[in-house]
Structures are given as structure tokens and as C-alpha cells.
Image (cartoon, helix red, strand yellow):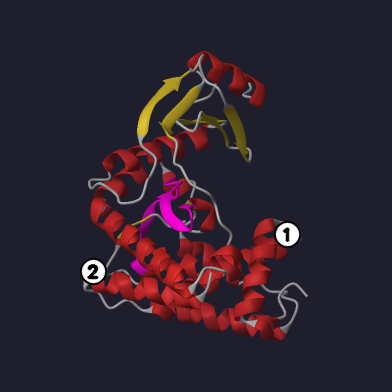
Amino acid sequence: MSPDFELTTDLAHKILKEMYPDAKRITLVEHGYDNIVGLVDETYAVRFPRNADAYRRSQYEKSVLQTISQQQELEIPTILGERTNPPCLITSFVHGTHLKANELNNFSPAEQEQFAKDIAHFAYKLHQSLSVDEVRGFRKEFEIDKLDEDWGVYFERQLSKIGLPNAKQSELITHYYNAWQKYESHTNLVVVHDDLHTDNVLFDNGVLVGVLDFGDTNIGTPEQELRQLYRINETILKIAIETYSQLSGLELNSEAAKTWAIVQELGSYVDRLSTNSLNHPSFIRACNNLNNWLPEGNWGK
């Protein structure tokens, strides 16, 4: 896949005007170097991949979304069509508002509990709706494993690096990496969204209403899926773990989910530190979270 010309926002806007001549509002969002996304009248979301890897990712996400077998309680993108030159994938627009972690922390205890239960219900229903074997087949078909480094390989590569700012950081990294290896499980495997952080969930008047971005869908465990909730607070994570356990009949481990979250942030921290990318958003986020969870490490200071 490659368009016959360089895709720019101006060109994407022109193509969208041709596709939707009666559109009243077209908003363009650049997603790094990989995609341009056009939002049309809060009705359509049109993704233009800018390179072959982004195109493969979009085709993988299309296959995943078309395979979800049960009606979801939350709104998710629906595949509506695609074009070939330039390539673009057309989905339904998912309504709602993004909230940051600090805004969710300002919810009342009852609102936080409801959010935790709602995200656990979504995760459980999603896991029941997708076949591990089928998604493995999609990953092989579109060579997604060449785009996504296995978590185990990534953690081993990042967390074995030397030259950290202090001995306490090295000690904590060794401890949590060893704990993650203990918790890493090859049982109870499900198809996970694997990116359920605040940028990918939508709210309406404080109620969870939608989930975006299924391009990182992977094979993993329920604890892996719910790990991102620890970035908000531990109470929400624990309620979600308890709710999922009740729905599934499985005994999930909240410590495993916390360890997943911590090790992911440790990986981001070491990765950006080793390349001196200290102003990168993922390094800043990792420092904030690690100083909240493990203040003795003095991360980034």
C-alpha cells in the first residue's frame, strides 16, 4: 500500500469534501507520522494511513472490529467502508468527551465505582466476543507482530539496561520486573483491547459511553487488560478487578494488574531516559506515575 502522492492535511480535507460534499464540519487530526483522521459532522471518522505499516494496522483493526460477535453496551467504532486511492478506512463517529485521570479522581466515590464496574463489564464482554485463535490469525495475516514488540521481549530489553540515575531505581526495577515475570500467565488468555487508558475512553455527563482505538488488540490476561486503571487510582482498579472476577468466575489478582502498570511505566522511563528524550510525554507521564507509586525512586529528578 502506498498512495500515489504525499498525503497532507490539505489533500485529506479536499478528498473528504469530495466524499461528503454536503458536510457542514470537517475536522482533521494528525496522529503522528502514521495517520490523518478526518471527523465529518460527528457522523463519520475517516482514517488515512500515511505508510504501509499504518495501512496494515488499519486493516487489522478493521478485521477485529468486524469480528466482535456480541452487541457491546458501550459505543465502539463500526466499519462503514473504505477507499483505495488514497487508502482510507471509514468508521462511525464515537460520541463523548475525553477526561483526564485527575478529572476522574474528582468523581464522587459512587461515580468512580460505577466507572470501574462499567469498564470491567466492557472488558469482560469484549473478551467473550473475540476468539483468541481468530485474532492470532489476523495478527499473522497482517504481520502485526513485526510492528508490535512482544511485551516480554520489550521489558527484558528495556529493564536490563544499565546506567540508571541511582541504585534505588535499579533495585526497584529488578524487584518489579521479577514480580512481573512471576505474574505473567499463559492461562486464562483472552483477546484484550490492551490500551484502555483515558485517551481511549469517552464520557457523557460523567458516565462511560464509548471506547476507541482497537488497533493494539492483542492476546493477554484480564489483569493485563485492566492495568491502565491503576494510572487513575487503586480503588478503581480494585473495584474493576472484583467486578470482572464476579462476572467471569475467575480469581483475578489486583497485585498482578498493579505490577503490569508499574513495569510498563518502568519500561517507558528507561526507554526515554536511554535516548535522552526527557521532554517526551511518555517520559513525563512515567515520572509522574512512578513518583506517585514508588516515590523512593526519585524518578526523573
Identify the image quadrant of residue 43. Answer: top left
Q: In the image, what residue occupies the spot 57% across and 69% down?
A: 106
Left or right, 68 with respect to 285, comes to left
Q: Which mark is residue 275?
A: 1
Q: Are marks 1 and 2 in contact (CB under 8 Å)?
A: no
Q: In the image, what residue occupies the spot 73% across and 59% down?
A: 275
Query: How far apart are labels 1 and 2 at the CA level?
Result: 42 Å
Residue 215 part of the magenta-drawn span: yes
Q: Is residue 253 visible?
A: yes
Total marks placed: 2
Residue 97 part of the magenta-drawn span: no
Q: In the image, what residue occupies the spot 50% across and 59% down?
A: 197
Q: In the image, what residue occupies the spot 46% across and 69% down?
A: 112
Inspect the image, locate mark 2, and give the three-letter code of the amino acid beneath it: Ser
Q: Nearer the viewer, residue 75 or 175?
A: 75
Disc 1 is placed on an element classified as loop
Disc 2 is placed on an element classified as helix
Inspect the image, locate mark 1, and give the three-letter code of the amino acid beneath it: Thr
- Against 155, residue 47 (above or below) is above
Q: Nearer the viewer, residue 73 or 204?
A: 204
Residue 295 position, x and y percent, is: 67, 83
Q: Quadrant of the C terminus?
A: bottom right
Residue 139 position, x and y percent, is: 36, 45
Residue 240 position, x and y percent, is: 38, 71
Q: Nearer the viewer, residue 117 or 258?
A: 117
**Residue behind mark 2:** 248
The boundaries of the magenta stretch are: 202-222
Which mark's residue is nearer the viewer, 1 or 2? 2
